[in-house]
Image (tube, grey):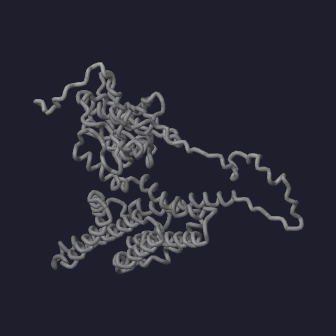
Amino acid sequence: MGLFGGNDKKREPESVAEAPKKPAASWDDGAAAALPKNSTYFDALRTTAFTNHNTVDNYVEFWAALKVNEQDDKWRVMHYMVHDLNQRDGKFVSEQVSKTDVSFPEAVALLARNEYIATKMEVTHKDFDMETEYPASKYPELKVHYHDIEHYKKGANIEGIAFDDQNQPYRRVQGRVFASATFKRSEVVRSILAVDQASTVPSVQAKIEGGILSDIFATASDRAATLDNILKIGQVLATMDEFATQVGSFYISIQRALKREDKFDRIDGLQPDEKKEVLERAENGAPVRNNDARPFPKIIDGLIPEMNAKLEAAKNLGVHVEPFQKFAAECELYANLLYASQNLAKLERGFVSVNNSDSNLITQIRDSVDKAQKKFLDLGGTQEQMDKLKSWVANPKKDPIPGWLPGFLTRYYEARGKVMQKVQDRQAGVTQVNTMTVDVKPPVTDQFNDTTKKPPAGSVLDDTPRTESGANSPDFDKFKNVMGSNRPKQGPQP
């Protein structure tokens, strides 16, 4: 044995050629195949806005990525500049950043790079408060290009992307980061909580609910559906429609408790005759009547449990009801907070009275809020959502009926209408074949047994193998270092 553990046997003569070694098989962890390449929920993302203190002309700038090809998921990255938009001769300038339309991951990478560079140019660039200086209500051009678009980081987190401390994007696999990089804890937390973040984005919530409705209604258009399937989908439709009616009853009850008469004026997605019918069912099911002395206990203790029971029935039929359960919990929290705010007003009036305040009101406020908070958090609601709702209810200047309440009903009926229209279109495309009686059928000849004749391409009899064209967006790894970082890579790259 040698000094370093080697073998002391004589070496073979150098003239004897060693057998060539087989190349080692490359290790494949399968991560590349698992990485989503397309955007699921968003068709536009943007950066924050910056004031560019240019030596010639100061202006506000931001970048946005817009989906321009739905089928291939192709995006175009734009640079927008605002020059004195609050003046009569203000200008809105746009220029294309990506010379060609790019994939979703590359679009995110370009947004991340431009925002990162702007944040590091502290001499010329400062953060700009677009909401205060250029509010959406006064500047429609900025409403559609900036205010109505989600920030790219939140959107990218929801779509499955995390950002390291250099602001470089990395794909996640099943919510976990697979990369050789350093991440700030806050970024990792935001990445992990992407599903919770999704529930605060109306466009994402609408697609989640629409996707569930699509699953519910798809069976109705299946030509091969069995009798059991048809009966089951009928049960599901009836159950979910009853839940939507209960939400409508909740909406009407809240209006009556607040002495409002909005009815269904803020709800879209229904024809006038449909809206009238749905409104009548909601009004009949509302437990609160006009000038009711105790409206909120009837809503909280009566209607909310009925909504949850209907969702349990839908769950037993195989419906993924979690998003709807969270919505019902949000309704419960909202009703409790609204009830507490009314009691709070009574409590404050009691402060100035000779008899001081009613301690029972304080107990009612605490009990109702604590009960609602627990239910809301148990179903996955976030503390941030809850704090926003509390602040909103406690602010008397705001409309006491939030937009998300009629918004849910609008999304439900719009999604239901779109899917059922597809069902009707498919059913209209089915041709009814009338069979002839036996005595008039033509004789069977070789004309009807010609197996050499190929059926028309694309017909139901055409059995030519087909290959589905996959997403042609390039591998995300190609773009994750687009910012040109020179830091050494550690460990094997996935």
| Residue 58 at least partly seen | yes
Q: In the depicted view, which residue is nearer to us: 251 or 429?
A: 429
Spot occupied by residue 448 in the image (x, y as percentages of width and height): 82, 54
Spot occupied by residue 343 in the image (x, y as percentages of width and height): 26, 73
Residue at 26% over, 70% down: 369
Q: In the depicted view, which residue is nearer to us: 409 or 195?
A: 195
Spot occupied by residue 20 in the image (x, y as percentages of width and height): 35, 28
Residue at 30% over, 51% down: 192
User: Could you tell whether 7 is left or right of 436 in the image?
Assistant: left
The residue at the far left in this view is: 3
Q: Quadrant of the N terminus?
A: top left
Q: In the depicted view, which residue is nearer to us: 36 or 299?
A: 36
Residue at 44% over, 57% down: 208
User: Could you tell whether 230 is left or right of 199 in the image?
Assistant: right
* Quarter of the rendering containing residue 432: bottom right
| Residue 62 at least partly seen | no
- The vertical placement of 144 against 77, above or below, is below
The residue at the far right in this view is: 439
- The vertical placement of 453 against 224, above or below, is above
User: Could you tell whether 172 is left or right of 206 in the image?
Assistant: left
- The vertical placement of 42 against 20, above or below, is below
Q: Quadrant of the C terminus?
A: top left
Spot occupied by residue 381 in the image (x, y as percentages of width and height): 31, 61
User: Could you tell whether 159 is left or right of 239 in the image?
Assistant: left
Residue at 47% over, 77% down: 285
